Amino acid sequence: MFITTQAPQDDQISKLVPVLAKASQILLEEYQNYCAGRAFNIDQKDDQSPVTQADLKVNAYLIEQLAQVTPEIPVLSEESDYSERHAWHVCWMLDPLDGTKEFIHERDEFTINLSLIQNHQTIFSIIAVPTEQVMYLGYLTELPYKYSFTQGTWERYCKFKEVEEDAIQIGLSHSSKNPKYQQYIDYIEQESPVIKREAGSAYKFCMMLEGEIDIYPRFHPTSEWDTSAGQGLLESIGGGLVSLAAVPFTYNQRSTVLNEGFIAFRDEETKQIALDALGNVSF
């Protein structure tokens, strides 16, 4: 849960929050125009995934602003050239519109993901949710904050002994039709009732911070900018994100920016449940 707190006295946060709030407003206006049926450009990348004018507009704005806030730190963005990335020991990792397909299908579960990578580890994360006008942010070594753009209010994650719930909440993508997901859920249901919650993009990580999802399995590939910010935020509250071999993801290290599948969990208890169930899935 999150409880009301004072604004953090941190220079990096103070500089980045208005930038991400403005980027969120740009993205929200693009979404509103698209839903209203106004002229809107959607193209396809080489990998056949969609890219919209909203992706590119928000990307251009954030690249420009990050160059002003931290000119010494390069940006590894989904929508920009990152061919020099292996020379970067520190970099920003950016997805200016995580959930492009959600956006196109007029589902409001899309986010802006920004994280700071140092020596292949996520050390600072922001996930902004434009349609809710909030962002979740924080350092790996501290409990995260939640900030409301519209109200200007701050909340902070609070660890407390939660009332035991009978059901395990499993987060799934809207496109999670692979029978492996049902194998996974069937195993957990042998020990506990399961509630399935479908949502798009990195929005599921925000739901985990809010206690609405306990375990998030993903059995098809993602990219590093899809998971970095969410992993950092989950690790900061005692949860995490690991590969299907139970190893935490590292970043800007491999020859490709593609990730294999993963399991995300809220805490150590759900980690054990999540990994036990993984052994029951046939890959």
Image: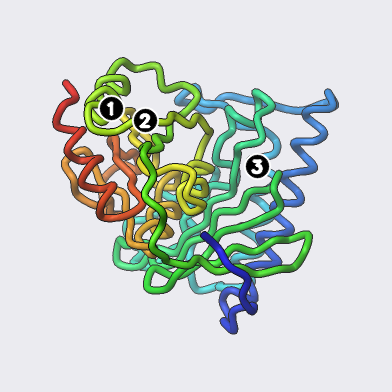
Tags 2 and 1 touching, CB below 8 Å = yes
Where is residue 125 shown, x and y percent of the image? 48, 61
Q: Which mark is residue 194?
A: 2
| Residue drawn at 38 percent across, 65 percent down | 236
Q: Is residue 131 left or right of residue 49?
A: right
Question: SS at mark 2?
Answer: strand
Number of numbered discs overlaid on the protein picture: 3
Question: SS at mark 1?
Answer: helix
Residue in front for this viewpoint, 117 or 172: 172
Q: Is residue 53 left or right of residue 47?
A: right
Of labels 3 and 1, earlier in sequence is 3
Of labels 2 and 3, earlier in sequence is 3
Of labels 2 and 1, earlier in sequence is 1
Q: Amino acid at mark 2?
A: Val
- Around disc 1, counting alpha carbons within 10 Å, would you say few (fewer than 14), some (14 to 19), or many (20 or more)? some
Q: Is residue 76 above or below residue 159?
A: above
Asked which quadrant contains residue 279, the reply is top left
Q: Which mark is residue 189?
A: 1
Eye-nearest disc, 3 or 1: 1
| Residue drawn at 26 percent across, 31 percent down | 188
Where is residue 159 shown, x and y percent of the image? 42, 66
Question: SS at mark 3?
Answer: helix
Eye-nearest disc, 2 or 3: 2
Tags 2 and 3 touching, CB below 8 Å = no
Where is residue 142 shown, x and y percent of the image? 42, 73
- Around disc 3, counting alpha carbons within 10 Å, would you say few (fewer than 14), some (14 to 19), or many (20 or more)? some
Residue receiving disc 3? 56
Q: CA distance from mark 3 to mark 1?
A: 43 Å
Residue in front for this viewpoint, 198 or 262: 198
